[in-house]
Amino acid sequence: MRRQVSGMLAGVLAFLLGAASYSFGAYHDGKVDAYLDLMRGKYQTRAFGHLAATPYRDLLSRKYGIGQEVVAGCIVTREEAEEARGYNEVMEAAIKRRFGKDIFSVTRLEAELTHGGS
């Protein structure tokens, strides 16, 4: 409970800092976006390119409610990459806290065992 409160306070602080009239850059903006999504109860990661549905991504979504948002195509700007990096750092840590530190590797293994691929 204390961690959730600390996380929420950090999220509010990040939002307030992000709402200032200037930006700390794409990396910081991505972190702010992640905290806002977490405050809404939204769990997802951000990725690039054309991502076909896979048993791994389907299992993350169906079993845990974790989505994946494509934020850029195959050509990615430095700003897009930095924003996604900041977002995913915050979001992946929160996902691991909520569902367990091995959620990604366990889900990938489960998808491989039940569907023969990732």
Image (cartoon, rainbow, N blue to C red):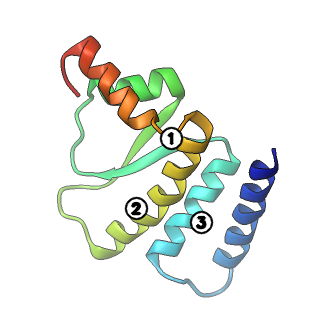
The image quadrant of residue 85 is bottom left
Please tell me the numbered disc located at residue 70.
none
Amino acid on which the number 2 mark rests in the picture: Ala
Q: Name which residue lies at 26% across and 15% down.
A: 113
**What x and y, as percent, mark residue 106?**
39, 28
Q: Residues within 10 Å of mark 1 (few under 14, many from 20)?
A: some
Q: Dot 3: few (<14), some (14–19), or many (≥20) neighbours within 10 Å?
A: many
Q: Which comes sooner in the sequence, label 3 or label 1?
A: 3
| Crowdedness near tag 2: few (<14), some (14–19) or many (≥20) residues, C-alpha within 10 Å | many
Q: In terms of image quadrants, where is residue 105?
A: top left
Question: Mark 1 is on which residue type?
Answer: Lys
Residue at numbered disc 3: 32
Disc with the residue nearer the chain's start (2 vs 1): 2
Closer to us: mark 2 or mark 1?
Answer: 1
Q: Which mark is residue 101?
A: 1
Q: Which residue is mark 2?
A: 84
Q: Is residue 7 left or right of residue 53?
A: right
